Amino acid sequence: MSGKTVSHDVAGIVVSHNVVSDNFIAGIVLHSNAPGDMLMKNAATDNTVAGNGAEGEVGAFQTTGMVGAGVVTPVTDNTITGNHVCDETLGIYVTGTPASHISGNILDTPASVPPSLEIVGQGGNVAAGEPVVYTVENPTAPTGLPYQYWADSAAGWRMVQNYSPDNVYAMRDVAAGSYQVVAYSLTPAALKARAWHDAASASHIINVGSSVSLAVMGAMSGMTANSMTVQAAAKNLLHPVYQFWWQGPNGQWTASGNYSTDNMMDILPPTVAPAQAGTYAVVAYAKDANAPESAAYEVFSQPLSIKVSPRVDFVLTPASAAINPGGSAVLTLSQEYSTGAMAPGRSLDNLDSTFTIAGANGQPASGFTISGFGGGIEAMLDGTYTFLGAPTRAVGTVNVTAGSSVAPGTYTVRASDPDHMDATSAPVDIVVR
């Protein structure tokens, strides 16, 4: 049947009490293979299926009795029960079929392990000392298959239960840490041939007493003055990866991107300009690298509150001054918020500052001296002079003096903070007449 719509019934299509044999492809196929296909609530019950072909389109490359496959859209809530499958290499092949019901089938086949192996047990975060039990479910495989369990922890990989018909593995008194438990299954023939690569596998990850904390590292060289670096530290995670989220004063949350091994991040990096002043909330998430990205497998920090002041700028006034050779211009250097309000004296490490003077050609000018901030008179070497250990205040003045050898012309003066190189004043023009 194809191209039909069956809806609003107790079941969609029921295939029951048929003999399906000697077909070119698999005998009974429940298959969603195109975008928009919705295949659910169908049933294949009490059929006899034998001697059919393969269904390579979904990966069943050997003779196959029955197929449940959601290649594009998952096939859900279907029932395959009470069927007798024989003379096939693969009895029932399922993939992309969550929440389907497969039980009570008789599989007289030499089937290798089909790709429906599932490990059922608690995943995600559990309490220390709590017992955890895992069970391999393989409803489409013949009975009597051997199963093996491995576990990865801080001590490394180790086999915790060798191949046997026992499909249950119990972890007792689980200590703090994180663990990946993997179950394998082989056919008896493959086990005898030691064909380990033919094994089907499934895994679960648990976190026991796992957590992540977050701390502020402070402003760093090369960052804007109001940027912050935060560092996350995971505890009791095997191979931790991190993701950061922060909420700005406007209430909007921003993510750092995909999980990565980088546990540090710049909040309000230089690419975010202008920064919005106010209080920011930052949260770090962590999980094991192999764990799914879902709340069940993640741990997260307490929100960290970071108060960000407006950006502080160097302001040099007046915008221009005219002097004669041998004369001086008095310039005022202040620290102001981007709002125009005066900033405290310690906003940019007191008044430590570097002054540069350049000619009309942009090259460093010579013949100038500079004084101020309680210091003496100093010559500007190659057009640059730096005050260090200047007084703690928000405003100060400097005298820029043109020597008698300075040629007439327009010279540009700038002030910057040597510890925060992004804090640079707008230029002031000094015209030497």
Image (spheres, rainbow, N blue to C red):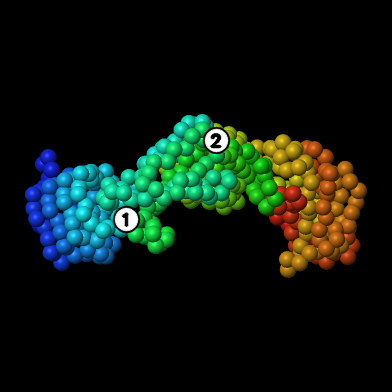
- Amino acid tagged 2: Ala
Q: Which residue is mark 2?
A: 175
- Taking depth in this image into account, of 137 and 125 the one nearest to the observer is 137
- Taking depth in this image into account, of 57 and 189 the one nearest to the observer is 189
Q: Residue at x 57, y 45 (%)?
A: 154
Q: Which residue is mark 1?
A: 113
The quarter of the rendered structure image containing the N terminus is: bottom left
Farthest residue to the right: give it.
376
Residue 71, position as x, y percentages in the image: 27, 57
Residue 111, position as x, y percentages in the image: 27, 58
Q: Residue at x 23, y 45 (%)?
A: 102
The label on residue 264 is: none
Residue 378, position as x, y percentages in the image: 89, 54
Q: Say if 63 sits above or below 238 in the image.
A: below
On the rendered structure, is 173 left or right of 418?
left
Classed neighbour count for the residue bearing mark 1: other residues with Cα under 10 Å, few (<14), some (14–19), many (≥20): many
> What kind of element bears circle 2?
loop
